C-alpha cells in the first residue's frame, strides 16, 4: 500500500492492480490489505451482482459513520445508512424523475449561453483553451443555478465563493487527504480522533445559502424551476400530512452532496469526451451531424425531447463513462457475517468491500481493445452480448447514483451546445493517453487539458 500522502496511482491504481491479478489467477474474488485493514474484492460478476443488488441486506451501506451534530453538512445521502438512509432516499427519489428533469431543463439550458459566449470571446485571443477549467466553471454554474437557485455568473466572476469552496473540497488539501486516508484506509483511527473534513467557514456558508434562499422564496412567493422549489414543495407536503419536514441543515447537507457529487464528475466527463472527440474526428463529425439535424427539426433550438432523441450522443457519453468512470471504484460495508455462495469463504461483519469499476471497464473480456474509444460498443445489439454488471459508472442496486438522470442531462446538453458551434482539435504536443491525478477521489487528469477550438 502506498504512502497516502505520496501516492503514485492512488486507490484507483491499487484496486485496478488487484482486479487484474485476481482475474489473471482465475479467482472469483480476493482479499487485500489497505495498510492494516483487510478488504474484500469480488471479481466474478455474479458475486459483484450479489454484493450490489441480490444480497443487498448484507451490504447496504457505504460504511461511513457521520456525526450529525459535529458535521451537519456530512449527514447526506451518500454517507447515511440504515433507516436514516431509507428515509432520505425515499424523500429525495421523486425529485429526480424524468418529469422533474424536463421541468428543470430550461434552467440548465440557460447556463449554456454564458459558456458559449465565454468560449467565443476567448478564441479571439487564444487558439487553445483550457477546457478542463472552462467546463468546471460551466458545471458549477449549472449546479449552483439548479441546486442552490442562484445565478453564480461565474465566467464574469471567477472568484465566487462556490468556486472557492469547490476547490477546497476537491483540491486535495492536507485536511481532505487526511480525511480520505482515515475514511478508506484506517477507519479505526477515525473512532479515536475526530477528523473534521469541512472547515466551519465552508459549513456555515452552505447552510446560510440554503436558509437565505428558501426564506427569500417563501417570503416573496417566488418560484423557479430548481431543486429549492422541490424542497419547498416537500416541506409543504410534510406539513399537510402532519409530518416533520427536513431541517435547514438536512436540506443543506443534501444540496452539498448534489454539489460535490455533481459538478466535478460532470465536468470531467465532458472534458474527457472532448479529448476523445478531438483525437477521433470521424466520431466528432458523426455526432455533430446528429446534433445539427436534431436542432434543425426544432427551429435551431435544443429541446428536452430533442436531447433525449439523440441516440449517437448517448453512445458517445456511455463510452466516455466506460473509459473514464469518474468514480473508479464502488464501496460497501458488510453489515453481518456473509458466507459467499458456493465457496468456503465468510466475509466478516464490518469488512469493507471494494469493486473496481476501472478494472471491469477496461477488462478485455468485456471490452476488447479496451483503450480504444468505440461508441458502437453500446448499441442495443452489442449491449445484449455483454453480461450484466459490466457498466457501473453510476454504481448499481438500491444505492445507485440518485443524480444519474440530472448528470446525463447536464453532460449531454453541454456537449450538444458546444459541438453545434465549435470544432475541437488536440494541441500539437497533447498525448492521447492521459495521466491521472493519484490522490483525487474523482478521476481527473494531471494538469490542464487544452484543446484547439474553432468556430464553425
Ligand atoms: C457524471 C456524473 C456522475 C457520476 C459518474 C456519478 C457517480 C456516482 C456513483 C458511482 C455513486 C455511488 C453509487 C454506488 O455506491 O453504487 C454515486 C452516488 C451518488 N450520486 Fe452521483 N454521479 C454523477 C452525478 C451526480 C449528480 C449530478 C448528483 C446530484 C445532483 C449526484 C448525486 C449522488 C448522490 C446523492 C449519491 C449517493 C446515493 C446514495 O447513496 O443513495 N451524482 N454517484
Image (cartoon, rainbow, N blue to C red):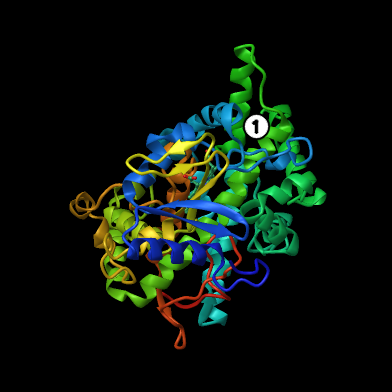
Q: At numbered mark 1, what does the secondary structure look like: helix, strand or loop?
A: loop
Residue 78: x and y, percent? Answer: 58, 42
Q: Is residue 265 above or below residue 229?
A: below
In which image quadrant can residue 397 be found?
top left
Q: From the viewer's side, name the closer residue of 170 and 229.
A: 170
Single out the residue that lies furthest toward the right.
Answer: 200
Identify the residue position indicated by label 1 in the image.
222
Answer with the quarter of the image where residue 296 lies.
Answer: bottom left
Q: Most extreme residue toward the front, as rendered?
A: 344
User: Quarter-wise, where is residue 126 in the image?
Assistant: bottom right
- Asked if residue 162 lies left or right of residue 39, the reply is right
Residue 67 image position (x, y, % from top left): 73, 38
Identify the residue at horizontal 62%, vertical 35% (top origin).
228
Q: Which quarter of the rendering shows the C terminus?
A: bottom left
Report how many numbered discs are placed on residues in the image. 1
Image quadrant holding the N terminus, namely bottom right
Amino acid at each position: 500500500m502506498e504512502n497516502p500522502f505520496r501516492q503514485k496511482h492512488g486507490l484507483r491504481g491499487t484496486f485496478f492492480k488487484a482486479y487484474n491479478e485476481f482475474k489473471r489467477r482465475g479467482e472469483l474474488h480476493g482479499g487485500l490489505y489497505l495498510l492494516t485493514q483487510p478488504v474484500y474484492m469480488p471479481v466474478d460478476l455474479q458475486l459483484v451482482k450479489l454484493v450490489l443488488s441480490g444480497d443487498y441486506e448484507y451490504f447496504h451501506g457505504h460504511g461511513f459513520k457521520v456525526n450529525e451534530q459535529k458535521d451537519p453538512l456530512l449527514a447526506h445521502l451518500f454517507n447515511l445508512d440504515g433507516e436514516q438512509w431509507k428515509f432520505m432516499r425515499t424523500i429525495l427519489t421523486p425529485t429526480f424523475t424524468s418529469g422533474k428533469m424536463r421541468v428543470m431543463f430550461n434552467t440548465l439550458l440557460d447556463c449554456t449561453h454564458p459558456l458559449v459566449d465565454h468560449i467565443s470571446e476567448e478564441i479571439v485571443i487564444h487558439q487553445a483553451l483550457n477546457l478542463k477549467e472552462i467546463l468546471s466553471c460551466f458545471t458549477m454554474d449549472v449546479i449552483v443555478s439548479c441546486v442552490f437557485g442562484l445565478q453564480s455568473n461565474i465566467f464574469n466572476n471567477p472568484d465566487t465563493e462556490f468556486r472557492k469552496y469547490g476547490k477546497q473540497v476537491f483540491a486535495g488539501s492536507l485536511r481532505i487527504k487526511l480525511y480520505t486516508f482515515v475514511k478508506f484506509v484506517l477507519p479505526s483511527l477515525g473512532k479515536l480522533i475526530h477528523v473534521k473534513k469541512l472547515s466551519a467557514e465552508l459549513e456555515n456558508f452552505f447552510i446560510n445559502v440554503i436558509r437565505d434562499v428558501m426564506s427569500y422564496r417563501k417570503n416573496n412567493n417566488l418560484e423557479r424551476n430548481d431543486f429549492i422549489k422541490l424542497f419547498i414543495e416537500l416541506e409543504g407536503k410534510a406539513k399537510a400530512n402532519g409530518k416533520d419536514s427536513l431541517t435547514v441543515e438536512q436540506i443543506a447537507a443534501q444540496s452539498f452532496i448534489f454539489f460535490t457529487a455533481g459538478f466535478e464528475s460532470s465536468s470531467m466527463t465532458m472534458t474527457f469526451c472532448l479529448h476523445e472527440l478531438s483525437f477521433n474526428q470521424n466520431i466528432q463529425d458523426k455526432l455533430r451531424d446528429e446534433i445539427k439535424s436534431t436542432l434543425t427539426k426544432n427551429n435551431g433550438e435544443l429541446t428536452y425531447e430533442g436531447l433525449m432523441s439523440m441516440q449517437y450522443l448517448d453512445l458517445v457519453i456511455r463510452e466516455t463513462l466506460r473509459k473514464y468512470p469518474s468514480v473508479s471504484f464502488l464501496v460497501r460495508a458488510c453489515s453481518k457475517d456473509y458466507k459467499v455462495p458456493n465457496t468456503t469463504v465468510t466475509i466478516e461483519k464490518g469488512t469493507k468491500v471494494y469493486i473496481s469499476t476501472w478494472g471491469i471497464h477496461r477488462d478485455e473480456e468485456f471490452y476488447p481493445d479496451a483503450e480504444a474509444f468505440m461508441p458502437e460498443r453500446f448499441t442495443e445489439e452489442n449491449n445484449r452480448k455483454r453480461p450484466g454488471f459490466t457498466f457501473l459508472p453510476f454504481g448499481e442496486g438500491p444505492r445507485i447514483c440518485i443524480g444519474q438522470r440530472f448528470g446525463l442531462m447536464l453532460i449531454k446538453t453541454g456537449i450538444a451546445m458546444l459541438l453545434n458551434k465549435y470544432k475541437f482539435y488536440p494541441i500539437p504536443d497533447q498525448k492521447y493517453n492521459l495521466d491521472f491525478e493519484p490522490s483525487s477521489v474523482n478521476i481527473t487528469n494531471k494538469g490542464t487539458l487544452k484543446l484547439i477550438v474553432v468556430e464553425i
